[in-house]
Image: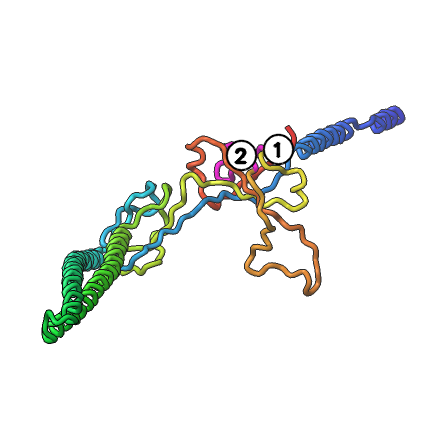
Amino acid sequence: MAKEHSTQENTTQKKPNKVIPIILGVILLGGLLFGVKEYIYYGKHVDTDDAQVDGDISPVVTRVGGYVDSIYFEENTHVNKNQVLVKIDDRDLKVKLEQARAAQVGASAGVNVGQSQIYTTASNSAVAKAQVESAQARLDKVNKDYQRYANLVKDGSITQQQFDQAKSDLEVAQANLNAAKDQYKAAVEQVSTTRNQLAVTNTGVNQRQVDVDFAKLQLSYARVTAPASGIASKKNVQLGQLVQAGQTLFSIVNDSSLYITANFKETQLEKIRNGQKVDIDVDAYPDMKLRGEVYNFSPATGAKFSLLPPDNATGNYVKVVQRVPVKIKINGSKEDIAKLRPGMSVNVSVVIKE
């Protein structure tokens, strides 16, 4: 019996264990399938998890200084383009506008005075011209009388005294003509001078109009409007606060400016082209599936735009794979895009082969 029992035990020990080979086969088959799948996938896709949502953020600054009179929005709420969000006390600006308008009225009055002076000097010029013509006619008559008296005095028909009187009249008429011409010349020059003065006055009127336009522009700046539609955030203004020109009051994240910035390794860029389709997975919303397309590439690596770019010509050189920012347009429903916020992390996969 003991010998028979020993023989049964040896037979049991010699049976091969088939479980382990099966498990190893399954593992190898699974690894093979996974490897083939990954090979096929990465042959058609280029992935990176170094990507985030970006967007245009518009800082809103005031162009004039003053005390904040009214605030018409709440932080982190939606605002529309050209909507009035902040009003600055504009009483000082209104006074400056009235001053500019008063100066404009005074300058316009000066133009009217200048035009009146032109009319007056033109009339004086016409009178002086008439006096020249009258003096010329008088000179012609006296000259003819003098010629006759010169012939008569030779044969004794008139006395020497009469001839001398005719000569004197001729000289007086000639002097009067010269004086009339001088007066006419002065009157013409006065007209020209008055016209030049009027031109200067008109320039002053134009300057006053520019001052009025500038005062109106400054007054319009007292109402701070939204430069674009979006979400107002980083509110840095309170009622009654004294703000200065150029001070940032808040920022607006534009509605229609969201995009993806994906930082691909330089070794991944060989097969990426503009217009290629992109699959986008948002970390904050795992169930959200977005599509996009490659839009453009940064002209330099991210390191070159850093505050202290690396200088490989100094120190010990260690080669580091650089990353190049790639801009990706987002294609999706308005509801999905509205959930995105600049700075959110995403994973992107560029489809390099359909």
Q: Quadrant of the N terminus?
A: top right
Is residue 196 or residue 236 the one in the foreground? Answer: 196
Main SS of residues in magenta: strand
Q: How many marks?
A: 2
Q: Earlier in the sequence, mark 2 or mark 1?
A: 2
Q: Residue 151: percent from the left, percent from the top?
A: 17, 67
Amino acid type at mark 2: Gly
Q: Residue furthest right?
A: 3
Circle 1 SS class: strand
Residue 351 is tagged as 1
Mark 2 and mark 1: span between their CA atoms? 10 Å
Residue 292 is tagged as 2
- 322 in relation to 282, above or below: below
Residue 203 in view in this figure:
yes
Amino acid type at mark 1: Val
Mark 2: few/some/many CA within 10 Å (<14, 14-19, 20+)? many
Q: Residue 242: percent from the left, percent from the top?
A: 27, 60
Residue 85 is tagged as none
Q: Quadrant of residue 185?
A: bottom left
- 132 in relation to 279, above or below: below
Is residue 317 or residue 6 the one in the foreground? Answer: 317
Q: Residue 197: percent from the left, percent from the top?
A: 23, 62
Write the residue at 18% across / 70% down: 175
Residue 334 magenta: no
Q: Which residues are magenta?
A: 277-294
- 3 in relation to 229, above or below: above
Write the residue at 88% across / 24% down: 4
- 243 in relation to 2, above or below: below
